[in-house]
Image (tube, rainbow, N blue to C red):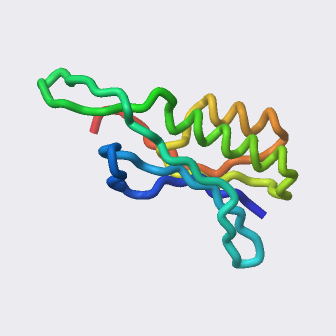
Amino acid sequence: MRLYVGTMTTVKVEMLKDSISSNLFYHSNGISIPVGFEVVKKTIEFIDENGKRKRCSEVTENEIARDLIKGAIQRQIPFTYVLMDSWFASKENFEFITKHNKHFIAVIKIKGKD
């Protein structure tokens, strides 16, 4: 019994450019059931250091992931592990998950010299 936190590819939503979604799935006995979904709305426009116009969200995808996991806990979905993409492999997420007596499995990218 595990929860999977992941992201979908970029989608174009009317009025919102470059939005993505965070998804939460409950997986047990070979069956996956969606139990959480949140569209990350990138409503803040800015110019990056290269002069390129970009958008960002008021909340991070990691904050949304923690909210989705918290919702699964509050709804008493019976899971032991949270399986996550490397995108969500952060100290804050690991501490949040272990604080709720759950375990995590994540790919961790190591930044360093080649």
Residue at the spot x=84%, y=41% of the render? 101
Looking at the image, is 49 positioned above or below residue 16? above
- The quadrant in which the C terminus is found is top left
Asked if residue 71 lies left or right of residue 63, the reply is right
Tell me where residue 55 appears, x and y as whole percent: 30, 33
- Residue 48 is situated, as x and y percent measured from the top left of the image, at 21, 24
* Front-most of residues 70 and 2: 70
Toward the left, the furthest residue is 51
> What residue is rendered at 51% in x and 38% in y?
61
In the image, what residue occupies the spot 63% across and 35% down? Answer: 93
Picture coordinates of residue 34 (x, y %)? Answer: 65, 64
Residue reaching furthest to the bottom: 30
Residue at the extreme front:
15
Q: Nearer the viewer, residue 45 or 51?
A: 45
| Residue 43 rendering spot, x and y as whole percentages | 37, 32
Q: Nearer the viewer, residue 89 or 46?
A: 46
Task: Determine whether, in the image, residue 70 is placed left or right of residue 52.
Answer: right
How many marks the image carries: the answer is: 0
Left or right of 50 in this view: 41: right
Q: Quadrant of residue 36?
A: bottom right
Residue drawn where x is 53% and y is 54% of the image: 6
Q: Is residue 46 above or below residue 78?
A: above
Point out the image quarter for the N terminus.
bottom right
Quarter of the figure with residue 71: top right
Q: Identify which residue, 107 or 63, lies in the foreground.
A: 63
